[in-house]
Amino acid sequence: MAILEGRNLRKTYRLSRKNTVEALKGVEVVIEKGEMVAIMGPSGSGKSTLMHILGLLHAPDPNHGPAPELYIGGENMASLSDNARTKIRARRMGFVFQDFNLVPTLTALENVTLACDYAGIGGKQAKQAGVAALALVGLADRADHKPSELSGGEQQRVAVARALVNKPEIILADEPTGNLDSERSAEILALLRQFNREHGQTIVLVTHDSEVGEACDRVIRMRDGRIRTAITGAGAPVMAAPAVAVPA
Amino acid sequence: MRLVRDLGRRKLRSTLTITGIMIGIMALVVFGSMANKIDALVKGGSDYYKDKITVSAKGGFMGLGGVLSTRMVAQISPLKGVDVVVPGVSMLLSDEVSGVSMGTPSMIQGSVANADQGREKFAMHYATGRALLPSDEGSNVVVLGSDLARQKKAKVGDTVTLRNVDFKVVGILEPTLTAPDNSAMVPMVAAQELYVKTLPALVADKLNTYEIATGLVVYPKPGTDPEAVANEIDAKVAGISTMTGKDFDQQIGAATSMLNAILIGIGLLSLIIGGLSVINTMAMSVAERTREIGIKRAIGASRWRIRREIVIESAIIGLIGGLLGLALGFVITTMGNDAGRESSTILFDLTFGTAFSSVAFATILGAAAGFVPAWSASRLDPVTALRYE
């Protein structure tokens, strides 16, 4: 069953009055529940834009060409209000970013429970979930440390814990290993893979790193705002259709 | 707690902003307390004068000035609308009035106890001792106002010196916040004897000491308009001027409400400046935290949450500044009053209302100042904010 399904996804960014960038030129994408998918492509190919749309951080352009459709678990999300999209991000998604992006004044545990707070879970329940999530990423003993007291790899593990704490259906990761050495990258990747296997969470990650791509079930390759090809985890092309990605 | 920690991130800037608010609130507390004191003085006067007419010698004011005579009682009593007439003697406690003083100068007031036949409605309460009695006439006893008693460090039973004459203290009043606080009340005869000594010998020789009055208090018949009675007295008696409650309110009330407006204005002005500095601090703090706001938005903080966070943070700046300003204002007004007590110059009356409203105002000001930066923070696009360096 498809958990994420997008059609006619277009996004044009207006940088100035005369300068616009067509980041997505009509993309069709289907991601199955429980898949771990990498989106790869050169800079400017639209891979981050696609992730932002799939993660409801941006809405697809509604008004030129055929109407965009974006289904999450079967519900159309293409024209939701900012508030409604925010609520879905809080409750049904987890995010991991390249620069770790922890709140510097909060401890590791507080950073994790912040996600519970936004999802409407507070108090003891949030604390328990936060401690459990930190234990899962192997940082139970660092709960009271501030981000500045943690290494890069540890900070990213806190970010992963934050993404997991609400047991979301979908985890979106934007270059999650981009700022880590190969050993730490492997750790983070292994963590994500473990949750994907154990809890069936769908993981979509944007990466430059072909090793990361190879570790996933499938790679969606992008170029110039379009999907070029889909490749299985083993690296063999499954389908060469230019605009449609179909799972293996 | 998290919000307080956020304030701690930029200690110097938060401190400067809080200091700005603190100074503004301090100014509001100090000037507000001064305005309270003036209001209490005026209200006391207004209450005292509203149901009576004060008669002074022409050119005098409020019972001070030229010399009248107790014989005028017989002249005024039969006039239309007049109920009771009480002669009195008022004089400054000391001829040396030091500099310009706020409030009422220290006075000696003499009249025969109970001569008002129960008409005086201005209630005075005794902290210790007793009121003057008609039987005190002829003896040198005194009831002291609260500030005067403190200034002279006098207790009931002590002897105090008023214009070089010894008086025995028989009672001390509760604070009234108005004229009686600085007054020494003595029997009529004692006052007349003190007063005659202040006059040049040539003048004094022509007077009968025991007929001297510096003013008369006229209580109109119940239900009579004091204005009409005052007009009647003005018309029928020569060489005097009358003052009613209305005259008092017009002359004193108008002047003091202007002064109060200026005082409160100064306080508010300093707060507006403090408020602008809160806006500046919060705007800078939002700019610095753009990325962090992006993270929070991305992982599911609603616009409303972001706004609330910033508004609460700036309200806390206001609250802390307000509390510190109140503390500082309290110290200043207390020290000012302690210093002024020696010269009976009580300048400040810091009421609970002033204290509470100053702090509440600072908090609301802080929250309001946070609105603009909060709004722009909540409008940030999470993706753009995340990329912000």
Image: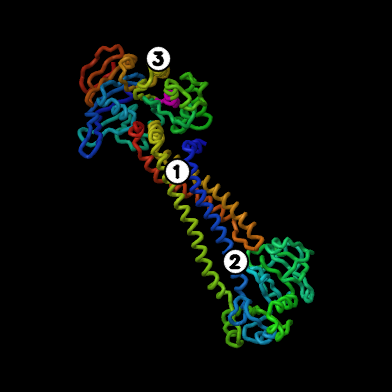
> What distance separates the C-alpha of mark 2 from that of mark 1?
49 Å
Q: Position of residue A164 (x, y in %)?
A: 43, 24
- Same-subunit check for callouts 2 and 1: yes
> What distance separates the C-alpha of mark 2 from that of mark 3?
83 Å
Residue A183 is tagged as 3
A219 sits to left or right of B114: left
Name the main secondary structure of what is drawn in magenta.
helix
Give the chain letter at badge 2.
B
Q: Which residue is at 38% across, 38% downward?
A: B287
The tag earlier along the polypeptide, 2 or 1, is: 2
* Residue B375 in view, yes or no: yes
Residue B99 is tagged as 2
Give the chain letter at badge 1.
B
Q: Position of residue A104 (x, y in %)?
A: 45, 30
Q: Which residue is mark 1?
A: B311
What's the amino acid at mark 1? Val
> What distance separates the C-alpha of mark 3 from that of mark 1?
43 Å
What's the amino acid at mark 2? Gly
Q: Are marks 2 and 1 in contact (CB under 8 Å)?
A: no
Q: Are marks 3 and 1 in contact (CB under 8 Å)?
A: no
**Vertical arrangement, residue B261 with respect to residue A14, above or below:** below
What are the residue bounds of the magenta stretch?
Answer: A159-168
Residue A55 belongs to magenta span: no
